[in-house]
Image (tube, rainbow, N blue to C red):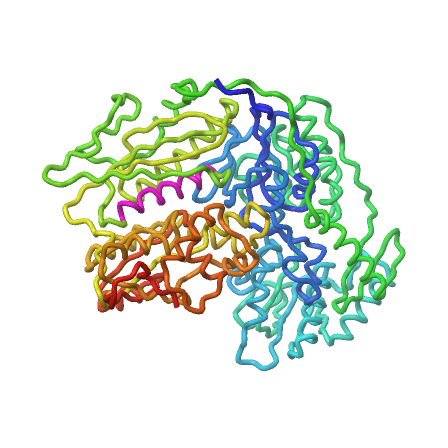
Amino acid sequence: MIQPQDTPMTERDLVFIGGGHSHALVLRMLAMKPIAGVRLTLVSDTLLTPYSGMLPGYLAGHYSVDETHLDLTRLCQAAQVRFIHARVTGIDLRAKQIKLADQPPLSYDRVSINTGSTPNLSVPGAREFAIGVKPISQLTHLWQDLLDQKGPDAHPHWAVVGGGPAGIEVVLAIAARFVKDGRPLQLSLVQSGATLLPGYGAAVQRAVAAALKRYGIRWVTGFRVAQVTADRLIATDGQTLAVDKSLWCTPATAPDWPGLAGLAVDAQGFIAVNAFLQSTSHADLFACGDVASMVASPRPKAGVFAVRSAPFLLKNLRAAFAQQRLTPIGLQRDFLSLISLGDQRAVGQRGGIGFSGRWVWRWKDYIDRKFMALFVAGLPGQAMTTTGPMHCAGCGSKVGPTLLADTLRDLPLYHRAELADNLIQAEDAAVALRITGQPVWQSLDGFRAFTDDLYRLGVVATHHAINDLYAMGIAPTSAQVWANLAFSHPRLLTRDFKRLMIGISQTLIHHQTTLIGGHSSEGQETHIALVVNGAGSGPWPKSGLEAGDWLLLNKPLGSGILLAAGQQNLASTSSKASLWQHLLASNRDFFLRLLDQTVHAATDVTGFGLIGHLLEMVQNTDCKVMLDSGAVPLMVGVQALSEQGVRSSLWPQLQPLLNNCILGRVEESLLACLLDPQTNGGLLVSVPAATGALLVQWHGVHKIGIVATAVEASDKKIEIV
């Protein structure tokens, strides 16, 4: 038996849906003082979440993306929070499961929702031709595209629809940006009312009117949009306004899935909550920010309330798990309102008193930067040290039979007539193949978990293991799984094991491979491995290179460096997105395409890096390889991280492989990329030049080198140029 753990046994799940301001602050506070016995999970469809207070400054060019966005993965890593990158499509309130797009559902004990609102594009034509400012995360992605567009009109006309504070800030920020860039742009601010900012005092109204005039922005009043076309806005009274683009800052609408799930919602569809930020219909669900509506004491959809809600939300989540009395939220009705005026000037109001000038912008800038610094200048973290139960090793570490049977019973399977696929009543060993006259091929591959998202881990591990057969020209037919899950409470273990196995099972179906059995256990860390079986009489050799061949690779390199950078909080969001895009990508389509072609040699690029696996291909041949380092595809940001010295922990063992290569004038950082160990890497194939010319026309396939006859005997058969 092993020694007891130093960390407690968690048995309940608290899931946060959305990375809004409230949730970001709550997670930061939980990093300092977790809730005992509760596992935390954040579900978000974006890796970055924008800070709304700095959006106008971002549009105006005063701030960069990094300065105005919170990195949710970094926050979760610091706070020891499981991060699930997925889009929520609904919630099963009875089963307590969150429905996710392209993933199995996620179970919870309590859930908090802070997803914001969606753009109100219900006006005919708006969905096709207008751009909604909310959700803000979408606007930041679209903004650079808008700036880069070069239309036929040298003086384009854009309209911002909505005369509230958001519309004012957006139209002035756009004007400031185009003036700064020296580009002409006609702007109109369109509103249905007749008064500028009717809820504000005269001083604020005068300052905003002066700013609109300063930028030559046309103020269009009494224009209630009834229809949007490709080139104009049409009002309810028949007025028209010719525009090239329209951005909408009108009051946003609620997402439809909370109401469809059966949650109590207000007349506009926002989640109805009480004074405790708790759903009025379901006590185990909390909501805050734009997605929520405090029915007894309504508040505006303003970021200041989302920020000030965070301490109350956290206090009540703690109380709910401890079954203690909840605390009503206390938010003042009068609050400081600051409005950016484009060119590093701002106007503000508090208690009916208005003020404006550059000093107000500096004040606002200080407040905004202070908030963002909470998530940049080192996040606190504190591990609990209470003693958990003892766990046995050996066969005593297996997953229990009921949990195992319940999980396997519901798994989807790919059925083959010649194979038994009853996983519940399986024998001690399983028939892998019933194919006469052909050799049976078997491969084993696996690794330690590098993500808390066990569904994604199952997908990646399955692709990775099957690549060994694809690299030999063999179609997989059956597989077995070994899963060692990190110690956790049986309730959480059941949830995790099911998500892991669904990821594996769905991916095996994609590869037309039958799951025939496996083994499960618990341990200090999660590990996953698969045995994959297949049959065939003519596999592709690893060392069948022929002079004149082209070397092709269908996936970029860099997963080892990016995973290492992620552990050190050095990877950018774009790099993380690139990493997961390729980790989750299958090699099956490329494999099937190769089956109809002549392949002289093949392997998959995995733990030894491109150089290591290429050395395996060239050994015991009379060939040499000319590797074009500049043609090797890399994931986003990999070489820049390599230049900073980021390396996989396997790097020291791989670096000596360069002694077997002739090195041209290749940067050290690029050489490190060529040695980077890959998870679910691409297929590396040697094919005739004519075949290569056809294959490189296929998306993602790159020619990275050529094969030649070795002129003289040498241990150095790879020349890197």
Residue 330 placed where, x, y %? 79, 37
- At a point 71% along the width and 59% down the height, the residue shown is 166
User: At 10% from the left edge and 39% from the top edge, which residue is drawn?
Assistant: 437
Q: Is residue 543 above or below residue 228?
A: above
Position of residue 313 in the picture relative to residue 257 (left or right): right
Left or right of residue 225, residue 367 in this image? right
Picture coordinates of residue 639 (x, y %)? 50, 60
Using the rendered view, name the quadrant where residue 406 is placed.
Answer: top left
Give the answer, above or below, for where 9 lies relative to 269: above
Which residue is rendered at x = 64% and y = 54% of the image?
Answer: 69
Q: Is residue 420 magenta?
A: no
| x then y, percent, for residue 681 | 38, 51
Q: Residue furthest left?
A: 437
**Majority SS type along the magenta span:** helix
Against 117, residue 548 (above or below) is below
Camera sees residue 674: yes
Please provide percent x and percent y for residue 262. Answer: 55, 34
Q: Nearer the viewer, residue 597 or 614?
A: 614
Please state, as top left, top right, bottom left or bottom right, where the C terminus lies in the image: bottom left
* Residue 461 within the segment the image draws in magenta: yes
Query: What stretch of residues is rendered in magenta?
Result: 454-470
